[in-house]
Amino acid sequence: QVQLVESGGGLVQAGGSQRLSCTASGRTFNNYHMGWFRQAPGKEREFVAAISGSGVRKTYADFVKGRFTISRDNAKNTGYLQMNSLKPEDTAVYYCAADPTRFGGRDTQGYDSWGQGTQVTVSS
């Protein structure tokens, strides 16, 4: 497994932007596909975006297409989620996760490493 730590959450106004980071340690980062998920109070954890180990392939949930961008810098062992045009319904705890074998999984299974999560709150 790889250890993951998210950062960059906080309070932002609707329409604003925020960038989340996910820093990895313990294993070769580019051997892992990475995903971002989020969980709002009372709701199940849902898929947001995923990126392949090389960074070439990306996929997004429909509700973030055109607003969020996933990226990674393997030299820095860090993944990113750039969030623009934020809406109050984007309020959630955001988690990054790593999957050693599968790219783009939209369920939590297969991701064998998870960060602790970072809270993003979008005010209206």
Image (cartoon, rainbow, N blue to C red):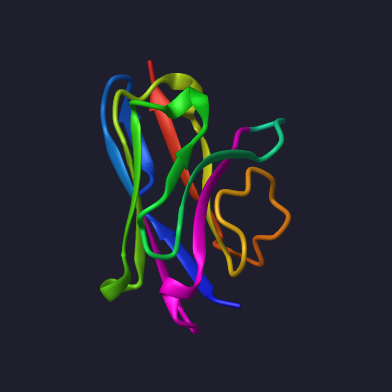
Q: Position of residue 67 (x, y in %)?
A: 34, 27
Q: Residue furthest bottom?
A: 26
Q: Main SS of the magenta segment? A: strand
Is 18 placed above or below 97 here? above
Viewer-proximal residue among 68 and 3: 68
Residue 12 is left or right of residue 89, and the answer is left
Q: Residue furthest top?
A: 124
Give the quarter of the image for residue 44.
Answer: top right
Q: Is residue 32 magenta?
A: yes
Q: Is residue 90 magenta?
A: no
Image quadrant where one finds the N terminus? bottom right
Is 107 placed above or below 65 here? below
Is 122 placed above or below 53 here? above
Viewer-proximal residue among 94 and 121: 94
Query: Which residues fall within the magenta stretch?
Result: 21-40
Q: Residue at x 44, y 20 (%)?
A: 88
Q: Position of residue 7 (x, y in %)?
A: 38, 57
Is 3 placed above or below 51 here? below
Residue 107 is left or right of residue 114, and the answer is right
Q: Residue at x 33, y 20 (%)?
A: 14
Looking at the image, how many numbered discs can be counted on the residues? 0
Image quadrant where one finds the C terminus? top left
Q: Residue at x 34, y 66 (%)?
A: 78
Q: Position of residue 76 (x, y in %)?
A: 28, 73
Viewer-proximal residue among 29 and 43: 29
